[in-house]
Image (tube, rainbow, N blue to C red):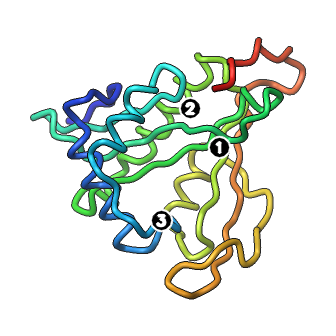
Amino acid sequence: MTRIRPAEHADAARICAIYNQGIAERSATFETKPRERADITARIADSARYPMLVAVDINDEVLGWAGLSVYRERACYAGIAEFSIYFDRQARGQGLGRHLLQSLILVAANQGYWKLLSRVFLFNQASRALCRACGFREVGVYERHAQLDGQWLDVVIVERCLLPTDAPLPEPHPVG
């Protein structure tokens, strides 16, 4: 039985290890420098503003994590966040991603975010399928967005609006 809960400081080492798997595999991020526990601890400390959730097994072992981060610093974008989601390679392909991402969407909406977005490598079909299953739409491609290991890669932009089109926008989050 898997459950979703907010990330805690005690989860930092496990989240870091999962993120570093993604960095090493070169399939989900342009990052090449492994993260350190302090990097993750700082993100968890900022989770009141940018929530981070974990999927855990019955022993409370972290199987994956999802979190929000700043989209742009300008105040007009304060209700938009970028999302990331990563799973331990042993936990992939079990349908856990949908549950975790849907939970993150709900938390984001409850905190007043009106849009979530991310950029996904074109070849990462599993992530693209997960995004579609969770109501994200692909809105375009950034060609030659950045290089990874000396090779230019394209990314597809995915977004999900969290409010109905006729809903008034909530008061924006403070920036910073």
The kind of residue tagged 2 is Ile
Tag 1 near tag 2, CB within 8 Å: yes
Judging depth in this view, the residue of 58 and 53 nearest the camera is 53
Q: Which mark is residue 165?
A: none
The kind of residue tagged 1 is Gly
Image position, residue 146 (x, y; %): 65, 73
Question: Considering the numbered disc 1 on the image, is that residue within a helix, a strand or a loop?
Answer: loop
The kind of residue tagged 3 is Glu
Q: Point out the frontmost of discs 3 and 2.
A: 3
- The CA span between labels 3 and 1 is 26 Å
Circle 2 residue: 105
Circle 3 residue: 31
Q: Which mark is residue 135?
A: 1
Judging depth in this view, the residue of 97 and 13 nearest the camera is 13
The residue under the point 63% across, 26% down is 176
The residue under the point 60% across, 79% down is 147
Q: Earlier in the sequence, mark 3 or mark 2?
A: 3
Q: Point out the frontmost of discs 1 and 2.
A: 2
Q: Quadrant of residue 144?
A: bottom right
